[in-house]
Each structure stands twice: as structure tokens, then as C-alpha cells.
Image (spheres, rainbow, N blue to C red):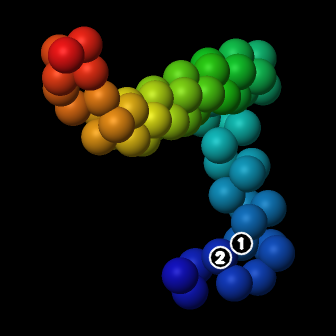
Amino acid sequence: MPFLREPSHILLLLIVVVVLFGAKKLPDSARSLGKSMRIFKSEMREMKNDGKNTDKKADPESDEK
């Protein structure tokens, strides 16, 4: 990504973001983004664990016999 090679480019990008969204909305936006990421990660972990558990318990009725 050639645009963000120099520190001055990153600084300019941060200034533009602050001007567009305002300093008051940035913490709230970051907080909600973090919360969304936590939910997404927990759902992904649950999906991975669910796949492992279904392999072990493919047919629960066969264990009873």
C-alpha cells in the first residue's frame, strides 16, 4: 500500500478522520467497534468448537445402546 509509507501520510489521514467524524464521536465509535469485534471473535470460536463437538457426538442415540 504505497499511500501509507511515510509517517506524514498517516498523520494526515488521522487529521482527516478527526475532522470528518469529530473528536466526540471517535471514542464511541471505537468502543462500539471493539464490542462488535469481541462478539465476532466469540462467535467464530463457538463455530470452531461446535464443529469439533459434532464430530465426537455424531449420533448420540448410538451411545445409549
Q: Which residue is mark 2?
A: 4
Q: Is label 2 in contact with label 1 (beta carbons under 8 Å)?
A: yes
As helix, strand or loop, the secondary structure at mark 1 comes to: helix
Of 41 and 60, the residue lying toward us: 60
Within 10 Å of the Cα at label 2, are there few (<14), some (14-19), or many (20+) other Cα atoms?
A: few
The label on residue 31 is none
Relative horizontal placement of residue 28, taking residue 59 as reference (left or right): right
Q: State whether residue 23 appears in this view.
A: yes
Of badges 2 and 1, nearer the viewer stands: 2
Q: Which residue is mark 1?
A: 9
Instruction: Note whether 65 is above or below 47 in the view shown.
Output: above
- Residue type pointed to by label 2: Leu
Quadrant of the image occupied by residue 60: top left
Q: State the CA–CA distance, disc 2 to disc 1.
A: 6 Å
Quadrant of the image occupied by residue 56: top left
Q: Position of residue 32 (x, y in %)?
A: 62, 19
Q: Residue shown at 65%/76% (left/top)?
A: 4
Q: State whether residue 60 appears in this view.
A: no
As helix, strand or loop, the secondary structure at mark 2 comes to: helix
- Residue type pointed to by label 1: His
Instruction: Note whether 1 is above or below 14 in the view shown.
Output: below
Within 10 Å of the Cα at label 1, are there few (<14), some (14-19), or many (20+) other Cα atoms?
A: few
Q: Position of residue 47 (x, y in %)?
A: 38, 34
Of 63 and 24, the residue lying toward us: 63
Relative horizontal placement of residue 5, taking residue 36 as reference (left or right): right
